[in-house]
Image (spheres, coloured by chain):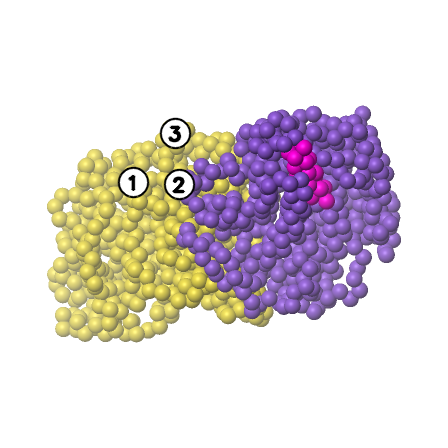
Chain colours: A yellow, B purple
Amino acid sequence: MCETFAMANEKAQHPPVRFETHPDRYKNVELSFPAEYGGEVACIALDIKEDGGLRPGYPLKLNSYDLGVDLELADAVNRVRFEHPEVKAVLVASKKDRIFCSGANIYMLGSSTHAFKVNFCKFTNETRLWLEELSAEGGVPTIAALNGTASGGGYELAIACDEIVLVEDGSSAVSYPEAPLLAVLPGTGGLTRLTDKRKIRRDLADAFSTVAEGVRGKRAVQWGLVDEAPPRAKFDEAVIRRTKDLVARSKRKKGAKMVLNPLSPKRETDRVEYTYVTVELERAARKATITVRAPSGSEPQTPDELAKKGDAAWLVRMARELDDALLDLRFNQPEIGVVALLTKGDAKDVLAAEKILLAHDADGLVSEVRLQLKRVLKRLDMTAKSLFCLVEPGSCFAGVLLELLLASDRVFMKDVEDVFVEVSPAQAGLFPMGNGLSRLESRFLGTPSQVGKLLEHKEPLDTQSALDRGLVTFAPDDLDWDDEVRIAFEERAAMSPDAMTGMEQNLRFGGPETLETKIFARLSAWQNWIFQRPNAVGEKGALTLYGRPERPEFDFNRT
Amino acid sequence: MSNVNNDRIPNNVSLSDDKRLQRALEAWQPSFLSWWNDMGPFGFQKDDVFLRTATSVTSEGWANFDYVKMPEYRWGIFLADPTKDRKIGFGDNMGQPVWQQIPGEHRNALRRLIVTQGDTEPASVEQQRLLGHTCPSVYDLRNLFQVNVEEGRHLWAMVYLLHSYFGRDGREEAEALLERRSGDPDKPRILGAFNEPCTEWLSFFMFTFFTDRDGKYQLLALSESSFDPLSRTTRFMLTEEAHHMFVGETGVLRMVERTASQMKELGLEHPDDVRKAGLLDLPLIQRYLNLWYALSLDLFGGEISSNAANFFAAGLKGRAKEERYEDHVALDSFYDMEVVRDGKLGREQVPLRNAMNEVLRDEYVEDCQRGVDKWNRTIAAHGIPFELKLPHRRFYRQVGISANVPFDPSGKMISKDQFEAQKGEWLPTEADKAYVQSIMQKPVFDPKQMANWIAPPKQGIKGRAVDFEYVRHT
């Protein structure tokens, strides 16, 4: 235990996190397709090994998880989407006896830097939202089978599923012990989902969230925390019955299978080279440049062609590479503050490649490709780096790649003749943001008519037209470009990273609130405030003293 | 001494002055009786049993002996007399007055402690409900029932606390105590040992020696509690618990005595020959001892425990006989512990508060050893060269840092294969179980008789002869 504390306090340097995995390499998650459902159900089961953590120093007891576990969970969901079109429902379960999951490992959190913790929580939140999207848009409903207690993040994982079955054995419970035990809050959208998703009465949610041991079977059903609480002997039966009902209700579109192969980028110290994406780092300037290249040659136009081309298809490959690059920047490059977003290639190729998304959304695989792009673009929206888009000759900000421009905090477009951006039907809601609006709609909250006008405009826009139509922030000419851009980056990189993160997150998500925006906004609030306050992490804070002999002492002043 | 009333629920807590509580307990009473009739001793509910009933906590009052039909046993609520100006004796609030009401801050933790303790009481009654049909003597039958009714009373004691101090949650927990069932996979009892089958008398005596002794130490630790009603309740329970351990200690002693004396008399050496004489061979007794000792050690919880630290810091649960220790805050000391880390044994300095379960376990181990020594003196007195041994505390554990790591009874780490290969030497085998069942099939209901595999006790109960008709079985 002392050893653990020593490690916890060191916050040692760790090797970089890698985000790709594969069911064959999972350590803690098992992806299976049980025979009793004729292969139409994917079972994602947690069997977390105590020594299965991504980093040393914290045994993952009682099915508690760390980032490594969540990467496997996210991968499993993605494999179901692409590699298992036959699957019609997902069952989230535990392979451990009498314990479902006890949430994020406390000692892992204690031994992590603040930045890592925030990014860990952000990633786990994204994965939970993926599960919800899998059901809402992928037509694959989900169910959590709680064969034992689900506490903290364990219940948050369950509540991200459509249905929850909890065994009633007199001791298994669902619980949020964060507030009473650790003086923090559930960090994976758990509180928001109580009220907004399961629509649990606020006073009951309040009671539930302050009792460390949680709520068991009968009352959990009464309060709406779970859907059913059968005794142990009837538990499997109930899970099977409900899962079969979900299969019957599934609205999954028919589509071909696509195998996702490893990306195998070339990594150098300050450069990562993927097929369609390059990341270059200028560490001293705290700057990264992401360049996304247009496809070259013909891209699939029909579902059959897409299935044949497999994961080499530009839309798929580019999205996966951008996703990996963003996670790499988030977790492994904390000091990078500003990201330049560039594109290279012919806009015609981009627009030709994206046509399939517009023409064939009824196909299951095409639809999954679109949803993946949607998720990656959201990942960009949620990345705590300043995003500056640079539009220069030879770039191709058109259609799906115009979303990168629209996601940026600022857009610089060189005022020269041969540079264009182009709006396509893809901007009409193919890739909605977390607030439910398209990036174009979010941009023109004050002048909504501008959205329709831009969508009707079927031609490339030169710098002046783009500036006039509100797509561009600044348009320096050839002479000023280098200096203007350099100064803008230097200025930005010099500002407080906390203030910038907070400001950007405020400004990026104008317009309506959704479950998703609420979850992330409140996550920022609690991560950056409650989690930083002495009552949690001070010398006498509850989180600091968890597992230690002393008891916490609170400053009882309310703000 | 507060007034003892002898209404439906004998008590010394002025129950008749608290109508709300009285009504709550009177409402719970039928559920309890229906549980007792369903899950209590099977087949003896109409018999007169010579039982001890507590009607007050004074030396005359707590042990009234008479014939009682078990369902008419008067389960009462008794708290040891209050200690004037009692102060908190350990933890962060040391020296402050003890609590007569529960501080809200500790409500959940206390409820959990009380529910966990309370759950063991009906559990053991359930585990033992069929034992009457294989009793080795009427004397032992009576002792079994005495243990059973008192476990029932201890349940009442915990339920009283739940009803008095924990509101609706407490009432629900009190109901749940009657709903869980020992060994039922659907609704198991909370702690592992209380779901293990206890279907013959060898296990019963081991259970009352080892498992009830865990109860003794838990009660000793709870009797230090800052929550005064819990302290007073558990102090009185301890007086009754002593008899349960007496049953276990003398039960094993009498089995050992019988085996050793017959080995000597008949010149038996090999266990097979001992079995041919219908006796419990000593290696077999050792294997049962190993099993029940390990199961009971688990009940103390993890060696390194944040719960234990919290309970101590908050003053909810102390150490057994806390006054014998010098440092009652225990914040700056460490416990030098042998631990398993990454598959190897090593030593670690554990903050003392986090090691409180282990501190309590230390006391328990020492207490068990005293009993084992007595048994060994009996064996030695007959000149039999055999010694019963407590296995190492790492052996066959399911809870804590040694859980599911294979160790031999001397505490040496071995491979899983080795453990599997030698398991039959260390733990009861199927053949052992079948043999034990085979010699304990027939009950002995004639007060003059004693089963072959056990020696008669040295004396009877409350001055009665050993062959007194302690149970009038019809």
Q: Which mark is residue A82?
A: 1
User: Upstream in the sequence, badge 2 or badge 3?
Assistant: 3
Give the residue pinned by disc 2.
Answer: A44
| Pointer 2 with pointer 1, Cβ within 8 A | no
Q: Secondary structure at mark 1?
A: helix
Q: Which residue is mark 3?
A: A35
Q: Which residues are magenta?
A: B246-265
Have a look at marks 2 and 1 and say if they share a chain. Answer: yes
Say if mark 2 contacts mark 3, CB within 8 Å: no
SS for dot 2: strand
Q: In the image, residue A75 lies at what x, y percent?
A: 33, 46
Residue A269, picture quadrant: bottom left
Residue A227: image x %, image y %? 53, 40
The quadrant where residue B362 appears: bottom right
Disc 2 versus disc 3: distance between alpha carbons? 14 Å
Q: Residues within 10 Å of mark 3 (few under 14, many from 20)?
A: few
Kind of residue sitting beneath label 2: Ile
Q: Chain of mark 2?
A: A
Q: Nearer the viewer, mark 1 or mark 3?
A: 3
